[in-house]
Amino acid sequence: MSVKRVAVLVSGGGTNLQALIDSRDRGELGENCTLSLVLSSASDVYALERAKKAGIPSIVVERKGKKRETFTRKVIEALLGNNIDLVVLAGFMCIMGPEFTKVFENRVINVHPALIPSFCGDGFYGLKVHEKALEYGVKVSGATVHFVNEITDGGPIIAQKALEVRDDDTPETLQRRIMEQCEWRLLPVAVRLFCDGRLAVEGRKVYIKKEENI
């Protein structure tokens, strides 16, 4: 099996990027995965420093001042130019044009800080997700890793992890616990499953193939 080249797309501090880097350094991403590129939508974000420290090449495709179609095309060109097999959206705060998911169909994954289909879709990002969850009074929340399609947070679900919502939770405390206990654990697992060729998409369902006996 050929090694899969992974690009991580970021727009901010890069905590999920760091989770992937740490997993790589512990050998948890496996032999079929290489973190080949970090692409940022802005030049002044800490995620780029994380990439530098980890020895991962990075590029900036500025979102500011560009039409969505132009920005989408430039991101696609950068990814194709680096022979990327899998695109990971890790705090990438940009809505891409439809061409993006056509070019990389079932090759883009995103982590969302809620149990889809709850608290997801247009306008649900960052602390807003956790604010709405607490307002609704849910007893559990969590995170979802899913393939990306043309519908915001609407692609087939790869994996989910839940945790209990505490009575004294604030949006900030809930966000932190979901990141640490759900997002940072789920995302590396999903990346490895993809790179090991163990994900099969059929309609809305993602099937995880059993690991081949060696």
Image (spheres, rainbow, N blue to C red):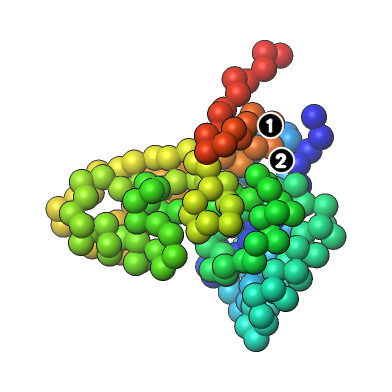
Residue 57 in percent (x, y) is at 76, 61
Q: Could you tell me which residue is drawn at 71 percent across and 40 percent down?
A: 33
Q: How crowded is mark 2: few (under 14 residues within 10 Å), some or many (20 or more)?
A: many
| 85 or 98: nearer the viewer | 98
How far apart, in angstroms, are the residues tagged by discs 2 and 1? 8 Å
Farthest residue to the front: give it. 203
| 24 or 108: nearer the viewer | 108
Residue tagged 1: 196
Identify the mark nearer the N-term, 2 or 1: 2
Q: What residue type is labelled 2?
A: Cys
Secondary structure beneath dot 2 equals: strand
Residue tagged 2: 33
Q: In this view, does 64 lie to the left or right of 171?
A: right
Q: Which quarter of the rendering shows the N terminus? A: top right
Labels 2 & 1 near each other (Cβ < 8 A): yes
- Seen in the picture, residue 207 relative to 181 is either above or below; the reply is above
Q: In this view, does 37 lie to the left or right of 128?
A: right
Q: Could you tell me which residue is drawn at 41 percent across and 68 percent down?
A: 123
- Seen in the picture, residue 109 relative to 9 is either above or below; the reply is above
Q: Which quarter of the rendering shows the C terminus? A: top right
- Seen in the picture, residue 11 relative to 44 is either above or below; the reply is above
Q: Quadrant of the rendered structure where residue 97 is?
A: bottom right
- Is residue 202 visible from the viewing direction of this image? yes
Residue 212 in percent (x, y) is at 67, 17
